[in-house]
Image (tube, grey):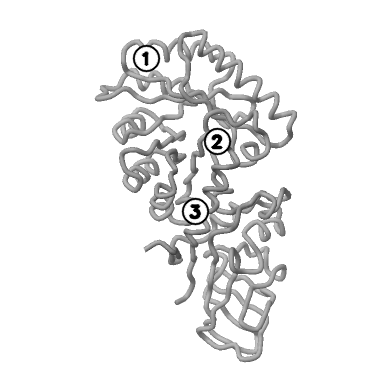
Amino acid sequence: MSAQYRVDLDAFARNLHRVRAAVAPAAHMLVVKDDAYAHGLDAIVRRARIEGVEWFGAFDVATGEAVRAAAGPEARIFVWLIGGADDLAAGIAADLDLGIGDAALLDDLAGLTLARPARVHLKIDTGLHRNGIRPEQWDDALARTRSLVDDGRALLEGIWSHISEASDADDDDARSVFLAAREAARAAGLPPRFSHLAASAAGFARGEFREDIVRVGAYSYGIRPSGGPGEEELGIEPIATLHATVAAVDPAGVHLRLGSLHGLPSSLAGRFDVATASGPRRVEVIEPTAVTVAPWDGAAPGDEVAVFGRDALYSATDLAELVDTIGEEVALRVSPVIERVYISSRS
């Protein structure tokens, strides 16, 4: 074995139940972008379905199609990166919920030959400018959506947006824009079935933001926010550990089959310890495909080291805070060439 990313699906299940309790009575939409935050999409989706997750946030249509294959026909799968008419057609064929943040997509939708109405969630830009329909263009987008609904080409399922979570004041302003957009939809005869605004942090901390659905990704995988509350306070736990084996031992140190191309920013060299059979040892050098660790008595090729995560000394967020980034950025660096191994008490 050179390296493994070991994912504890039972810990994942506990996080799912914790998230569900924290955001209730809203539903939990499990965000599974980027191969379920590098934990492996198929295994994560299948276990989430067993644990009762009904909504998935899949980011793009290709991921949504993969989630559909793993989750089965009953799951609701929301995608919001849509490139145009072809993406719309593929999303409708896969029975996905479509997040529309560009009014031009409504024109694309009007030009498609459809076997079923599209399930549309209109996104209002509440000031983040990530995407979304500007408030001054909202009434026009509602009119175009109204026409699609009247023609049987669309169902308005939701009104949604993102917030910055930079400050309560900014988020309060964003929420005011969101609520006004929803009221305008209702006044236009387009009452949405679902409203969703909050992600992990606001979903846990601010009940008034929860609406009908809360989109939670990082917390579901036990990744806490940098500079924010800890895992114990949040009631979540990291679910994965990056393990590596000793490849060689020489006077320069203990060399692991792992490197910056596999998940460790080179800027972390000299700044954290890994867990070995003889206790913590400092990571001294991080090269593209190898890591050198301070030596210990008896170190030998084949010995196993816990690098970061659940069973290690540092979590993904612990490492992220050392280099001024966020935990999910570290987790997403774990290369897809590293084997994923799943641990579960379920047969």
Gap between marks 2 and 1, in whole Å? Answer: 26 Å
Given the image, on which type of amino acid does mark 3 rest?
Ala
Asked if residue 34 lies left or right of residue 173, the reply is: left
Q: Is residue 114 above or below residue 31?
A: above
Q: What residue do we see at 71% from left, 56% from top?
A: 321
Q: Residue at x 49, y 43 (%)?
A: 30
Q: Amino acid at mark 2?
A: Val
Q: Tell me the number on the disc at residue 214.
A: 2
Where residue 209 sits: x, y (%)?
A: 63, 30
- Dot 1: within a 10 Å radius of its alpha carbon, few (fewer than 14), some, or many (20 or more) residues? some
Circle 1: residue type: Val
Q: Position of residue 90 (x, y in %)?
A: 31, 34
Q: Quadrant of the C terminus?
A: bottom left
Where disc 2 sits, the SS reads strand
Of the two numbered discs 2 and 1 on the same chain, state the one appearing first in sequence: 1
Q: Earlier in the sequence, mark 2 or mark 3?
A: 3
Mark 3 and mark 1 in contact (Cβ < 8 Å)? no
Q: Left or right: 43 with respect to 254?
A: left
Residue 295, compared with residue 121, is above or below; it is below
The residue that disc 3 covers is 13
What is the quadrant of the N terminus in the image? bottom left
- In this view, 177 is above or below 296: above
Q: Which label is found at residue 149?
A: 1
